[in-house]
């Protein structure tokens, strides 16, 4: 199994309202996540694109979002999605 790289895990800015969970994990660099922690409108648009699998990272992979109540749960969810894509 290949390692997922890069990975970033963030605390949800809006408490999961837009993000879907308290913690979120991505197979991307922070620079690829424009809008993830911006204002309401930007954050809503960011997660609309993520949920529709319409964002690409610097490695030309679809950016996936793992979600969970803890950082570990968010990472585990990302791993599951990454290897089942």
Image (cartoon, rainbow, N blue to C red):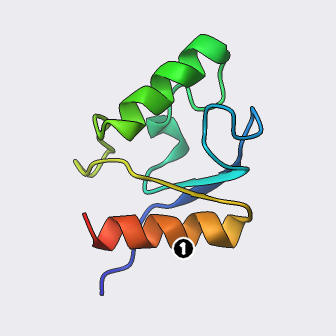
Which quadrant, please, contains the C terminus?
A: bottom left
Q: Picture quarter containing residue 25?
A: bottom right
Q: Residue furthest top?
A: 41
Within the image, what quadrant is residue 72 found in? bottom right
Query: Where in the figure is residue 21, as x and y percent of width and height?
Result: 66, 49
Q: Residue at x 44, y 72 (%)?
A: 79
Q: Nearer the viewer, residue 21 or 24?
A: 21
Say above or below: 43 vs 82.
above
Q: Is residue 70 above or below residue 57?
A: below
Image-based side of 61 in relation to 30, left or right: left
Q: Which residue is mark 1?
A: 76
Q: Is residue 69 left or right of residue 66?
A: right
In the figure, is residue 3 to the left or right of 61? right
Residue 40 in percent (x, y) is at 65, 16
Residue 75: % across, % down:
57, 68
- Determine whether the residue tagged by mark 1 lies in a helix, strand or loop: helix
Q: Residue at x 75, y 35 (%)?
A: 13
Q: Position of residue 57 (x, y in %)?
A: 33, 44
Q: How many marks?
A: 1
Quadrant containing the N terminus is bottom left
Q: Residue at x 71, y 42 (%)?
A: 12
Quadrant of the image occupied by residue 38: top right
Determine the residue positioned at 30% across, 41% down: 53
């Amino acid at each position: 199994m290949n390692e997922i790289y890069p990975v970033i895990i963030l605390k949800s800015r809006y408490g999961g309202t837009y993000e879907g969970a308290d913690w979120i994990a991505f197979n991307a660099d922070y620079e690829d996540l424009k809008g993830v922690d911006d204002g309401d409108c930007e954050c809503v648009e960011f997660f609309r694109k993520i949920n529709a699998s319409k964002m690409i990272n610097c490695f030309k992979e679809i950016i996936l979002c793992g979600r969970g109540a803890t950082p570990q749960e968010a990472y585990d969810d990302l791993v599951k999605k990454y290897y089942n894509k």
